[in-house]
Image (spheres, rainbow, N blue to C red):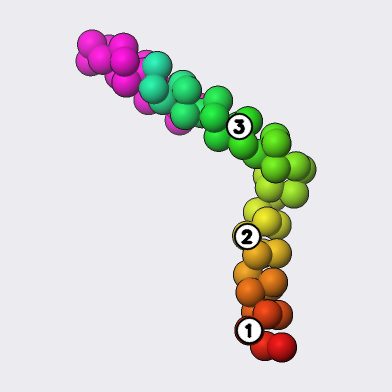
Amino acid sequence: MKTWITMRAALALGLPAVARGVGRLKRLRCALLRDAGHEAGRGNVVTAAVLKVFYVVAC
């Protein structure tokens, strides 16, 4: 919803390139999450990375 509002605001201000860029960034972000797997959408990737760093440092 925020992306849609941002794109509409950019178009209203006469900045179609900005609106296209925002759309591209959203598609890129969604593709990245999809390619990373289902865990990325829930924030578990960050948690797993922190736990791995903690494990390496602690051991």
Relative placement, left or right, of 33 versus 22 is right
The answer to whether residue 26 is seen in the rendering is: yes
- Measured in 3D between alpha carbons, the distance from the residue under mark 1 to the one under mark 2, in whole angstroms, is 17 Å
Task: Give residue 46's mark.
Answer: 2
Amino acid residing under circle 3 = Cys
Task: Give residue 57's mark.
Answer: 1
Q: Give the residue number, with chain letter if any, for mark 3.
A: 30
The residue closer to the viewer here, 45 or 13, is: 45
Question: Which one is earlier in the sequence, the residue at label 2 or at label 3?
Answer: 3
Residue 30 drawn at (x, y percent):
61, 32
Task: Say if 58 sits above or below 26 in the image.
Answer: below
Amino acid residing under circle 2 = Val
Quarter of the figure with residue 13? top left
Question: Which one is earlier in the sequence, the residue at label 1 or at label 3?
Answer: 3
Quarter of the figure with residue 5? top left
Q: Is residue 33 magenta?
A: no
Q: Is residue 14 magenta?
A: yes
Can you name the residue that lies furthest to the left here?
13
Relative placement, left or right, of 28 versus 16 is right
Amino acid residing under circle 1 = Val
The answer to whether residue 9 is seen in the rendering is: no
Task: Say if 29 sits above or below 38 in the image.
Answer: above
